Image: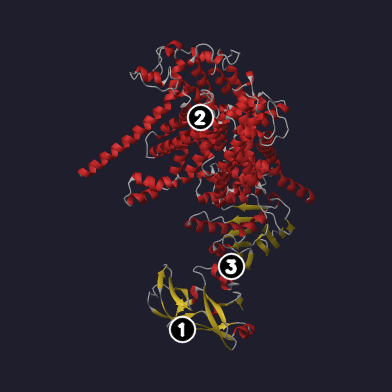
Amino acid sequence: MAEALSQSSKMRLGRLAIYACLVIVAVLYLMPLWVMVTTSLKPLDEIYGGSFIGLPKVVTLDAWRAAWSQACIGTECTGLKPYFVNSLLMVIPAVALSTGIGAINGYILTKWKFPGANFVFGLMLFGCFLPYQAILIPMARTLGLLGLAGSIPGLVAVHVSYGICFTTLFFRNYFVSLPDELTKAAMVDGAGFFRIFWSVILPTSIPIIVVSCIWQFTQIWNDFLFGVSFTSGSSSPITVALNNIVNVTTGRKQYNVDMAAAMIAAIPTLVVYIVAGRYFVRGLTAGAVKG
Amino acid sequence: MSTLEIDRVRKAYGHLEVLKEVSISIGTGDFLVLLGPSGCGKSTLLNMIAGLETITGGEIRIAGKAVNDLSPKDRDIAMVFQSYALYPTMTVRQNIEFGMKIRKVAQADRGRAVKTASDLLQITHLLDRKPSQLSGGQRQRVAMGRAIVREPKLFLFDEPLSNLDAKLRVDMRTEIKRLHARLGTTIVYVTHDQIEAMTLATRVAVMKDGVVQQLDEPQAVYDRPANVYVARFVGSPAMNIVPAVLEAEGATVTAVIDIANRPPARIAGITLSPEAVRRYAGKKVLVGIRPENFSIASGDIPPSLTIDFDVVEPTGPDTLAVFQLGGVEVTARLPPKQAHAGQEAALSVDTSKTVLFDIDTETRID
Amino acid sequence: MSASTRMSSRLAAWLPRLVVAPSLLVVIVAVYLFILWTGLISVTSSKFVPTYDFVGLEQYVRLWATPRWHTAVANLFIFSALFLALSTGLGLLMAILLDQNIRAEGALRAIYLYPMALSFIVTGTAWKWIMNPGLGIQRVVNDLGWTDFRFDWITNPDMAIYTVVVAGVWQSSGFAMAIFLAGLRGIDNSVIKAAQIEGATLPLIYRQIIIPMLRPAMLSVIVLLSYIAIKSFDLVLALTNGGPGTATELPSTFMFSATFRRNQMGVGAASAVMMLMTVAAIIIPYLYSELREKNDG
């Protein structure tokens, strides 16, 4: 009896240790976000006065206002607003196009297999793991030749080109698990290629459509390399503008504005993550866990 | 008229030949069962009839018309799949209506067809549910409803019962048989379950390795299997196949089978053609005896063999008794309580049901 | 009639290929043709714009004679090794702890994973501020009384690369955790029960049975994190901008600055080819084994 008791108290101690570990790590992980938010709400003097980790004594939205509409990017002091709009104009068509194309590719590569379909899939799959440095120079030249250099449509084209590799992977792995008999039944019912896609396959794929949209949204919104390589000045996406704000070296460094700007750039993807985190995780693990 | 003729049909994937010159022909109202183990080509053949797989060689004719180049929708067929293949996002009603919508059937006619089919299958109360809310048996009925409203020349069933549990399988089997009696449509039905074949079919085609081993009525397949493969595949427990030596006695033959530590068994009075008697006298053959064709020897009939029972398995209606005969394990189906493990018994054999096979080609000797 | 049905059925057979063809064309051009193009530029004397005069492997020789590239390669090794080891270790530990029927599992998992939703630029900006010696962590600890405490890695050329490791691990270890957790959830519980009945303790069960069973997840984590490490670009740019000096240069930042800032397109292309070859050496065997196993199963 006494032994059983000590056994159970030992168990409880173990549980406590596990929880303690998990909570400490969680606090460490939340710390940067905490610092970003609190810093962005503090007046600059308070920051230089040495307040780093604590709550703001005076809460002000000045830094947010400055980051949104006044901060200088290069010589233009417009704040992040136009760049935020740029990113939206880029991300919406790019996500829609790459998801749509990926869906139909995945449908073909699983339900209308032709000789060499697996090879086609393999070609696209490698595109997911391409280090983009390897295509930067030719892409810059090609965009120039097409008259798309430095433009939002140009960036959309780039993101769609490489995004379809991921979206095709998502949809293919999802459609593989749908029974082939479903397409066969629809064929016997008289439905053709597009009819089956619209009426039978697509209505069943809402979850993977969400995964694909979220993944593409996060990737494209967060992209920096393509933005900094293929755009300049007023056509830049928000990540490039943020980096410019932060790397301003003249004058007294406005850390609160930097943090507010970083928050503005982070909010869209954070919101998506909070609203649809489950689907976000599925997108992350799609490349790793076998479908 | 809805006949089906499969005329020297071949299917090959590259060099891999999965169907080798298959010819089957059935008449209006026939219920053809394609029976065989997985990989025998039966599902491929069904898909070729449906138009879901291309035909490498030969011709398939439905109601006398070659359909090789027709797409599934133009072949006037309907199909029920193993996984039912119900469209998961549509209600039962939408599932049943889908094909009719594509064929642009007027709404009133669609409603009427759905009503008739759902009454027939007793699924009227399920029409507004989604497939995920249905039990296996209900899904099965919906899949059949979807096929029925097409009023096809030909129904195709691809292992429709294999996803159901044992009890439901028996019920749905009866249901399908009733449906066939009621609609009188020609049916092609694929299964690996020989009981389904026996109970449902008017014609059975037993297949193996892309070749039809035997095409006949179910009882004929059971009583007179074309070869050892068919004999073993149809019937449960399987037909006992025992090596023996034939002795000619006038117009009939006697099969002599060795038994360890006992005098050999003598199964006398097996009828063969005079030609076969001449050819096989004194030769080794294989004897096929169904378990139920053994019986405990009684007064008038002299016993054919005396053995010791090894294992005894009561099943309720009868008892399966296992013993050694001719160096192989043999099962007899006997009335309950007549056999006990370790018991010595004298058995007789119904020679009119005994079949003989050539030991090399394994085909039946007539 | 029969001829037209045949025509339409032939069209139907080609339709899927026709529909997938544009995507395939885009991928062939944007991935494979562009790789070849980069390879071509790497054997020319291109500077500000591509010039197509063959100079052999001159640019590669020049690349490997550049001290800055040596720094970049050395940094890549340090960064990758530490980033992989820490992210994998931390990810595995958190996954195992989270798998113990934890009450607030959903919330904790969300906290560990949220950095993955952020841009590396945001991460870099945040950590640059946190590790700022004058106002960040060092100042906080100093103000608490430990006035000798120094945490000035970000301005110290010898230590700056480790700040990239810290920020990278913070961002990506949740990703490793997610994959490990999925792997753990895929393990049949009866294996653990069987081992418990045989008297094995929990740590032993994990060491001897469960972690070995996570091998496929481990492989995925290592491959995907290596890929992230090799292409890390934004993080370094935002956090240290390659500095102080060239102390945190990585191949990815080297390629970018050579090509777009220093007018050495040929050298930049050569460095891109080196990066591509490194990634391919890791990824192609991985994809090959993943696809082959899939086909077997």
Q: Are marks 2 and 3 in contact (CB under 8 Å)?
A: no
Q: Secondary structure at mark 1?
A: loop
Circle 1 Cα neighbour tier, 10 Å, few/some/many (<14 / 14–19 / ≥20)? some
Q: Position of residue C147 (x, y in %)?
A: 35, 18
- Judge depth for marks 2 and 3 and give the one in front: 2
Q: Nearer the viewer, residue B58 or B183?
A: B58
Query: Subunit of mark 1?
Result: B
* Horizontal arrangement in the rendering, residue C26 relative to residue B354 (left or right): right
Distance between the alpha carbons at the discs numbered 2 and 1 = 85 Å
For the residue marked with disc 2, what is the amino acid?
Answer: Ala
Q: Secondary structure at mark 3?
A: helix
* Residue B105 visible in image: no
Q: Nearer the viewer, residue B314 or C198?
A: C198
Where is mark 3, residue-wise? B218
Query: Subunit of mark 3?
Result: B
- Judge depth for marks 2 and 1 and give the one in front: 2
Residue sitting at x 43%, y 80%: B307
For marks 3 and 1, the one nearer the N-term is: 3
Q: Secondary structure at mark 2?
A: helix
Where is mark 1, residue-wise? B303
* Horizontal arrangement in the rendering, residue B12 relative to residue A265 (left or right): right
